[in-house]
Image (cartoon, rainbow, N blue to C red):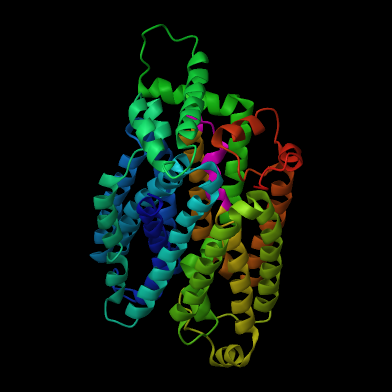
């Protein structure tokens, strides 16, 4: 179930990674002119902007229709977006195609980790959600490989973006066989179906019957508590979806534990993006072209492979080390790597135009090629990528575990929306920052974000490894729960 649902992650990764090779391969194929810095920024950031719009809507649909149906809707959008991009002849047609993909990515990035976390046993939840992140990074690796293979072919970028429809079609067929999550089934009144799904999930456990009964009881109690809070509702009255959404929103913001959960989730998602990693995913080929590497797309592949490998390590160790600890260990390495990268960039001459990296003064190009600094930048970015993939690339997507059932999809959707809002900012501002501030100050700014983020994580993010979804609710009920989580040994099993 994790891998079948996780194809959404593969699509997510492919469609974010594929733009790097596409931008350096399009040439003058769109609107009969080379892409400007503004063109590249708009084509890149429109995906994030539409993902920002889609993720809250996906949260509402996930509550009304179920998690599985939203995954199918995302597959349809992925397919339409790939076709639109592959047949685009103008910059605006490409922007429309990337925007449709953004709708799909926004829906998939919200509902897929929600789906997996609601199905997973508590002691395996971190690992199984990290498998989704592994598939995201795998999709990015595939995107870079495909980009490299087609980078020198005439019109090869059309194949690069068009191939994104294949996984979407496969998942659209596969999702029919997937079960709905037991928590949504109970919420919708299908308790027998929920019991059946839970019995399949826990069928290999010795005490499976008792586990299923305990989990089902916990879900029922949570729903009963929610019902008790609606005292103003007349007997027999059925709320429409607007009233229901309004009630959930009030519950999310006015209940202390829910509000703290939302603040943690939003903080982690904003930190994940403003630390600057996706600027590498979107513009790594452009960046390595600036540094005069002979094959920018192939060099960028090393970043994607590093991301994949260290996400695999995170998959193995996240439940052993714990979410909080893994962030506190990895974020300082990110900061130091970015500072070293900024210092290396400060000693390099820039090309005449970042929108056309090949337009570099000959003397400057010779200086760059003869210098060890491009290799230093590559090493720093590789170390930065490894530490990001091990911690910050994965932990924020564990956000579903923070929220009680009645506000889980809404809270997750708002946190995911902040991720895409921050992603939009990074995608839109990276190239202008590189030109206006210089690469050195751009990477220094990302390092400052990492330092600030580490302080906030240390202050408010408790350790949640090994806790059931219902236990997490109790941890945040009366405070941030940091000392309680460490003192009671959470995450040690």
User: In the image, is residue 386 above or below residue 298?
Assistant: above
Q: Position of residue 204 (x, y in %)?
A: 44, 45
The reply to whether residue 353 is visible in this rendering is no
Q: Which residues are magenta?
A: 395-407
Residue with the most extreme top position = 235
Residue at 70 percent across and 55 percent down: it is 328
Q: Position of residue 450 (x, y in %)?
A: 67, 57
Q: Nearer the viewer, residue 461 or 380?
A: 461
Residue with the most extreme front position = 206
Q: Nearer the viewer, residue 65 or 432?
A: 65
The reply to whether residue 397 is visible in this rendering is yes
Residue at 51 percent across and 76 percent down: it is 302
Q: Position of residue 387 (x, y in %)?
A: 62, 64
| Quadrant of the rendered image containing residue 234 | top left
| Quadrant of the rendered image containing residue 430 | bottom right
Residue 133 highlighted magenta (yes or no): no
- Left or right: residue 16 versus residue 130 is left
Q: Position of residue 222 (x, y in %)?
A: 51, 24
């Amino acid at each position: 179930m994790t891998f079948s649902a996780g194809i959404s992650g593969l699509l997510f990764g492919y469609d974010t990674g594929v733009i790097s090779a596409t931008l350096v391969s399009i040439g003058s194929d769109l609107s009969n002119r080379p892409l400007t810095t503004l063109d590249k920024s708009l084509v890149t950031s429109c995906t994030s902007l539409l993902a920002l719009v889609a993720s809250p809507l996906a949260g509402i649909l996930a509550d009304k229709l179920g998690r599985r149906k939203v995954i199918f809707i995302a597959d349809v959008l992925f397919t339409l977006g790939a076709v639109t991009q592959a047949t685009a002849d103008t910059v605006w047609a490409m922007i429309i195609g990337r925007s449709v993909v953004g709708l799909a990515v926004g829906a998939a990035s919200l509902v897929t980790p929600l789906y997996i976390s609601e199905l997973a046993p508590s002691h395996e939840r971190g690992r199984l959600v990290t498998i989704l992140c592994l598939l995201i990074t795998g999709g990015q690796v595939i995107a870079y490989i495909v980009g490299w293979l087609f980078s020198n072919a005439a019109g090869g970028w059309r194949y690069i973006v068009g191939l994104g429809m294949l996984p979407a079609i496969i998942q659209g067929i596969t999702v029919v066989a997937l079960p709905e999550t037991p928590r949504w089934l109970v919420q919708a009144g299908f308790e027998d179906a929920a019991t059946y799904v839970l019995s399949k999930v826990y069928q290999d456990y010795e005490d499976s019957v008792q586990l299923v009964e305990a989990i089902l009881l916990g879900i029922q109690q949570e729903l009963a508590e929610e019902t008790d809070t609606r005292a103003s509702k007349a007997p027999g009255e059925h709320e429409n979806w607007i009233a229901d959404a309004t009630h959930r929103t009030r519950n999310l913001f006015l209940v202390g534990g829910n509000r703290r959960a939302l603040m943690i989730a939003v903080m982690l998602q904003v930190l994940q993006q403003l630390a600057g990693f996706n600027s590498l995913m979107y513009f790594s080929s452009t960046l390595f072209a600036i540094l005069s590497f002979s094959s920018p797309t192939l060099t960028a592949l090393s970043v994607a492979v590093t991301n994949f490998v260290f996400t695999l390590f995170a998959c193995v160790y996240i439940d052993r080390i714990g979410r909080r600890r893994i962030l506190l260990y990895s974020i300082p390495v990110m900061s130091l790597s970015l500072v070293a990268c900024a210092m290396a960039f400060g000693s390099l001459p820039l090309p005449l135009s970042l929108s056309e990296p090949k337009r570099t003064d000959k003397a400057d190009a010779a200086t760059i090629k003869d210098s060890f600094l491009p290799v230093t930048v590559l090493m720093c970015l590789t170390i930065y990528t490894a530490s990001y993939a091990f911690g910050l690339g994965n932990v924020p997507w564990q956000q579903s575990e923070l929220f009680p059932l009645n506000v889980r999809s809404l809270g997750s959707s708002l946190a995911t929306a902040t991720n895409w809002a921050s992603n939009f900012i990074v995608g839109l501002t990276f190239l202008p920052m590189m030109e206006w501030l210089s690469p050195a100050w751009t990477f220094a700014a990302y390092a400052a974000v990492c330092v600030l983020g580490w302080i906030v994580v240390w202050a408010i993010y408790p350790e949640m490894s090994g806790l059931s979804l219902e236990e997490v609710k109790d941890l945040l009920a009366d405070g941030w729960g940091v000392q309680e989580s460490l003192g009671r040994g959470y995450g040690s099993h």
